[in-house]
Amino acid sequence: MRGSVPESRRNARTGRRRSHRTRVFGAVASAALLLPMATAGPAATADRPAAGALQREFAQAAARYHVPGSVLLAVSYLESRWDSHGGAPSVTAGYGPMHLTDAATALAAAPHHSDPGEDARGDLARPRAAGRRAMDVPAPAALPARLRTLERAAELTGRSPKELRASTAANLQGGAALLAAEQKRLGLPLSGDAADWYAAVAGYSGATDAATATTFANDVFDVIRKGQRRTTDSGQAVVLPAAPRVAPHAEQVRRLGLGTVPSQGTECPESVACESIPAPYQRLEGKDYGNHDLADRPASQKVDFIVIHDTEGTWETTVKLIKDPAYVSWNYTVRSGDGHIAQHVPTKDVAWHAGNWYVNAKSVGIEHEGFLAQPDAWYTEEMYRTSARLVEYLADKLDIPLDRRHILGHDNVPGTVPSTIRGMHTDPGPYWDWAHYFDLMGQSFEADGSPLSGMVTIAPDYEDHQPVYTGCAKPGEKCSPHGSGAVRLHTAPREDAPLIRDIGLRPDGSPSTIDVNDTGARASTGQQFAVADRQGGWTAIWYLGQKAWFRNPWWDPTAVGAHGRLITPREGLAEIPVYGRAYPEKEAYPAGVPVQTVTPLPYKLLAGQSYVVGATSPSEYLWAATFEPAGHRIVRGKDVYYEIQFGHRVAFVKASDVEVHSSRW
């Protein structure tokens, strides 16, 4: 049943703390939209235009096609945040600031990857084919219209497809031409009042259903009312002044004649478009079945986590896979181009998505159309916004804290036993913008401790922080420079020091690498760690049982002071084990339910080390080996566990092994 996030939480979203981040600002005369920005600044180069050039190009495109400047700017912001990404396409084949789609060209040129990984169900899983997902490359004629807007823009502007892909000015004109053509098609005037463009904006989304088109248009006009300013990836400062009194004519959307999608029974906030595409629950051969388990959460088990994934495939491929009863499952998929959401498995049921059965039983999984290893294949702002609203809604509905110990990436989910660690998935990867994602939920990663506190929150400036990664296209080959929310961890406070070792990933003890899928020496935005040491412009944290150093100078910080609960081994214990799941003790299992061995991971948590506490986890095991849910059992034990931020992935320790204390301020 659909619901809504409380109004107070929806209105709590704030901007990023640094000056170049998106911010809301006071009203400015709307005429300023069509004025060029000041041109003071560095001289233009081939890859970096003169300051103010992009603002002028927006104004020129708007004027040429008689589109209000605020409408053009706001649509572009929702599609690209005004970035050009060096001419690379988005995950849904959109080019340039206006996200003109040319899927035939993008798919033909893109390298296709399969995120290496485990079976998503975990302990009870049957063997499955290697690789995560197969990506289909459809023929151009079979592509939906929303993936072919660039060819229509070429017809309207007389510009070549190559120009529309590569030239920012041409791309903006293509977007303006599409908006103007839609306005005319709908029999509406080329008005200078933004309020008259609601239907054309809704149509620009390419959505085939009214709910998605309306959601997109509502978000565009929300941007117009609040205003935005930002420095783009090409160094261009762009301003959209706030116009808080704009009241669009939302009734215009009826002119589009769009259909509806089945939404009955979906669990989504009212502020997003959500349809039901159910994952099949059916018998297969013998006792096998797919592709999830029926349950009664939270009455049966508390849901503690929301796991963020990327699909490593197109929307069309992902929808095809979720309908396969012999494949795995997840609860939701979010489409990148317009933020449309499909729900596949009710939150009360257990989807097979995380590769860790304990986490599956205690989580909801959300897939996002995209590719981990394509840094310039960006996720749209609209996708981030609708996904953030969904997470905020689910966190409120299921009583899940909005922090990075409960909102996990798939790359933060631990292996269950030593043998599964190397196969764990690595999505959504180092290019997912956790800072912006949490900003949209009103949960910015700000300092709540002093610069010398005993705990830190990882918080590099996403756009300026560009560590080198390899393996996006070919093994060992450098990835394109790109913003990242992850810091790299060394064995000593210097850049040439070896990276931290992860003996779970590399039992031979060899150092971690800078490969885009190597999580062995990586800490990501929002994760919190206990401080082990400080030296010069470097900070050391306790990480995988080691002292791990990252560059964190006061003049360019990559972490902020924090305060919270820490665990350390109980007095008298030299070391304690860590686990990938919080299973009960042997004595808790009733007859007929096989005992799950509580196997430690190959790491040691040593005396004197501290780690940040997340969820307090009662020991539980969901035995679900039968098609009929009446045969399922939930085993609960006396042991209690704490979830901790142990490395890039979380882990669990027994409460009886540790002491809990507050970090120093």
Image: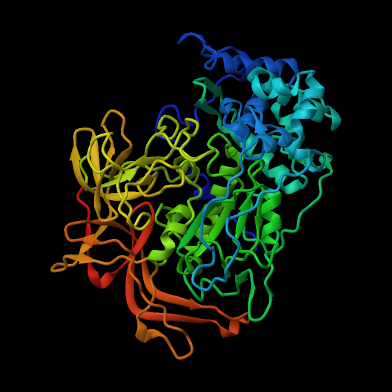
Query: In the drawing, does residue 70 fall left or right of residue 598?
Result: right
**In front of the other: 517 or 593:** 517
**In front of the other: 530 or 389:** 530
Which colouring convention does the figure follow? rainbow
Q: Quadrant of residue 214?
A: top right
Q: Position of residue 656 (x, y in %)?
A: 25, 73
Q: Position of residue 561 (x, y in %)?
A: 27, 43
Q: Position of residue 559 (x, y in %)?
A: 31, 40
Residue at image location 24% in from the left, 37% down from the top: 538
**In front of the other: 259 or 113:** 113
Q: Is residue 6 visible?
A: no
Q: Quadrant of residue 577?
A: bottom left
Q: Position of residue 412 (x, y in %)?
A: 43, 54
Residue at image location 63% in from the left, 82% down from the top: 628
Residue positioned most to the front = 508
Residue positioned most to the bottom = 591
Residue at image location 37% in from the left, 69% down from the top: 617
The correct choice, above or below, for 437 with respect to 407 in the image is: above
The correct choice, above or below, for 300 with respect to 122 in the image is: below
Query: In the drawing, does residue 520 fall left or right of residue 42?
Result: left
Tell how many labels.
0
Q: Please identify the quadrant where the N terminus is shown.
A: bottom right
Q: Is residue 540 visible?
A: yes
Residue positioned most to the left = 572
The correct choice, above or below, for 89 with respect to 662 in the image is: above
The correct choice, above or below, for 283 with respect to 415 in the image is: below
